[in-house]
């Protein structure tokens, strides 16, 4: 059926490429991923099957899916741009008495908590998502599968919300940094940012998608930091370590599972899908690592625009160098990249 559809559209299956997307979180740095998605959506021979997103990656995921549901790739690009412009405008109007770095320093020293500096629990992202995303329609009609990760406060486990579970609260939970926002309650359970536990979740995509190719868009640096010289920098570094380690742990489990599957010891559909899955990578962490500590919390349009352009450039380089590998073999050795 898929082959017949391609032929009817005048497309060759050898030219057509289908991908899953795995989108990391990183606050305002998620504008890099926006640029990646914008460039990918320009490609006539590329379709997206499933997206797994955490925090800013979750925001990008639902924005893309909403736009795609409305008007295909053109609609997805327009919706992503609209969401990020709204995020930038919200950042202009949120009055903060200190810089993000200074706020981190004060939070670490116990001078304030999210209950103190934001007693009314104002969250501009709530209004943006409410205005931009029709979650009821996404649950019913989205042709793109979506997974959104949040972290259970009680035990640190990842909670993966599927397409038919998507709500405004799920995306807000995925984006909830405890130093700046109160935990998000869903069915009585408090949640924090998904980056602490799954940044992003990969195994649900591998097991449940309709394609064996997944592109990971990385925006959280793995290492190579200079030693932080102040407490704000320490806080930022600790967040980066936590967010990158959750992904490292999952990839380590995936690679161990792949080795067992290929040895013939493990059987079953999940093991087979794991062993044959192909991975690809666009690494934006070399760009985000150069930004100032706390810039994740400062969505000014100049920085967002620069990240967007860098994301488009990263996607263009990936397509130029690895387009033909999609559907045939992995274009990245995850074990080597993540130093496992």
Image: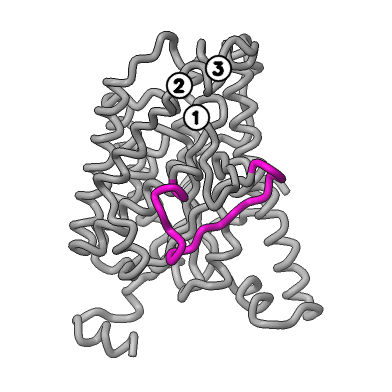
Which quarter of the rendering shows the N terminus?
A: bottom left
Of labels 3 and 1, the one closer to you: 1
Decide: few, some or many residues near mark 3? Use Cα within 10 Å; few <14, some 14-19, many ≥20. many
Find residue 67 and name its label: none
Q: Residue at x 51, y 41 (%)?
A: 184
Query: Of the residues under marks 3 and 2, which one precedes in the sequence?
Result: 3
Q: Which residue is mark 1?
A: 181
Q: Residue at x 39, y 32 (%)?
A: 28
Q: Which residue is mark 3?
A: 104
Q: Residue at x 57, y 48 (%)?
A: 188
Q: CA distance from mark 3 to mark 2?
A: 14 Å
- The span picked out in magenta is 153-171
Residue 312, given in percent of the width and then of the height, sits at 31, 44
Q: Is residue 155 magenta?
A: yes
Asked if residue 128 is positioned above or below residue 202 in the image, the reply reads above
Asked if residue 204 is positioned above or below residue 10 in the image, the reply reads above
């Amino acid at each position: 059926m898929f082959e017949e559809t391609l032929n009817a559209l005048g497309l060759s299956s050898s030219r057509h490429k289908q991908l899953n997307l795995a989108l990391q979180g990183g606050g305002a740095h998620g504008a890099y991923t926006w640029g990646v998605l914008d460039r990918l959506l320009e490609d006539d021979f590329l379709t997206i099957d499933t997206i797994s997103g955490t925090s800013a990656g979750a925001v990008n995921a639902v924005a893309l899916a909403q736009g795609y549901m409305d008007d295909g790739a053109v609609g997805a690009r327009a919706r992503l741009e609209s969401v990020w412009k709204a995020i930038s405008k919200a950042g202009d109007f949120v009055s903060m008495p200190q810089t993000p770095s200074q706020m981190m320093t004060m939070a670490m020293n116990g001078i304030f908590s999210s209950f103190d500096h934001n007693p009314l629990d104002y969250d501009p992202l709530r209004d943006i998502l409410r205005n931009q995303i029709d979650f009821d329609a996404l649950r019913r009609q989205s042709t793109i599968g979506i997974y959104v990760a949040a972290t259970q406060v009680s035990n640190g486990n990842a909670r993966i919300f599927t397409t038919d579970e998507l709500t405004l609260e799920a995306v807000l939970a995925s984006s909830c940094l405890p130093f700046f926002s109160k935990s998000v309650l869903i069915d009585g359970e408090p949640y924090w940012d998904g980056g602490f536990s799954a940044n992003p979740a990969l195994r649900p995509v591998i097991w449940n998608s309709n394609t064996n190719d997944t592109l990971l868009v990385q925006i959280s640096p793995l290492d190579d930091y200079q030693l932080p010289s102040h407490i704000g920098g320490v806080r930022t570094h600790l967040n980066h370590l936590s967010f990158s380690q959750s992904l490292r742990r999952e990839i380590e489990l995936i690679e161990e599972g792949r080795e067992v599957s290929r040895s013939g010891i493990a059987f079953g559909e999940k093991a087979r899908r794991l062993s044959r899955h192909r991975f690809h990578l666009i690494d934006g962490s070399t760009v985000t690592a150069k930004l100032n500590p706390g810039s994740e919390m400062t969505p000014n349009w100049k920085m967002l625009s620069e990240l967007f352009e860098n994301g488009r450039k990263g996607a263009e380089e990936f397509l130029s160098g690895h387009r033909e590998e999609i559907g045939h073999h992995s274009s990245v050795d995850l074990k080597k990249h993540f130093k496992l």
